[in-house]
Amino acid sequence: MRSVTYSMGVSLDGYIVGPDGGFNWTAPDEEVFRFVTDEIRGVGVHLLGRRLYETMLYWETADQDPSLDDSMLQWAALWNPLPKVVFSRTLSAVRGHARLASGGLAEEIERLRAEPGTGNIAIGGATLAAEAAALGLIDEYRVRVHPVLVGGGIPFFPRQGRRVDLELVETHTFTSKIVHLRYRVVGSGGASREAL
């Protein structure tokens, strides 16, 4: 059964975006970019909220930019054909290999888990991930902790007031002092379950 993963860069104080809406401190160096590119190879479908979808639209045509280096072209070659499901109340159409969600988040994840296919079901965007976490649908948290305190903003982890036990599966420290932490939700087996 396919696992649901949530992977993003986060400040040491737990935010994916600072209080000013900026996230320039998450710009990956070459080593981190290679790591994120390798991580996307294990994704079979990506679920996105509207804001992240609109941010990632850049990659739909990025391969036409002659100034891109090989690593960015490789990312675009992996990202563009990847199936995506966009959750939005305002968009009426999406581009590329994306489709608008036809149901709620739990329904979409249940349907995707039941379909044949390989690769994880990745969730992008804090709002969508918070909803998935509240429903007990996230199997793994993959956090790239940046050595910066931003003092507020949009939190990586939902503030839902419930306990979730995690098991550390993997760690990696990059030369830039960014630390990757991969946690599996205890009791998670990649199948739908009630909220913990």
Image (cartoon, rainbow, N blue to C red):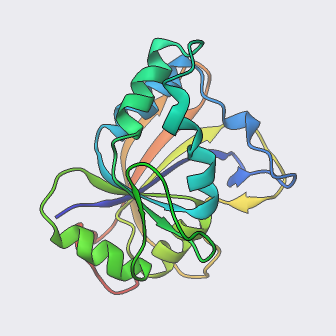
Q: Quadrant of residue 67?
A: top right
In the image shown, does 117 or 161 lie closer to the viewer? 117
Q: Name the residue rendered at 40%, 39% in the picture.
A: 80
Name the image quarter holding the N terminus.
bottom left
Residue 142 is left or right of residue 1, and the answer is right
The residue sitting at the right extreme is 20
Q: Name the residue rendered at 52%, 76% in the picture.
A: 131
In the image shown, does 24 or 117 lie closer to the viewer? 117
Q: Name the residue rendered at 73%, 35% in the picture.
A: 25
| Residue 147 visible to an observer of this rendering | no
Q: Quadrant of residue 139?
A: bottom left
Residue 157 is left or right of residue 109, and the answer is right
**Where residue 143 appears, x then y in whole percent?**
52, 47
Name the image quarter holding the C terminus.
bottom left
The residue sitting at the left extreme is 116
Q: How many numbered discs?
A: 0
Measured along the vertical axis of the image, is residue 135 above or below residue 156?
below
**Where residue 76 appears, x then y in whole percent?**
44, 31
The residue sitting at the bottom extreme is 194
Measured along the vertical axis of the image, is residue 96 above or below residue 100?
above
Residue 126 is left or right of residue 148, and the answer is left
**Where residue 188 appears, x then y in whole percent?**
28, 69
| Residue 17 visible to an observer of this rendering | yes
Q: Quadrant of residue 117?
A: bottom left
In the image shown, does 70 or 184 lie closer to the viewer? 70
**Where residue 87 appears, x then y in whole percent?**
51, 70
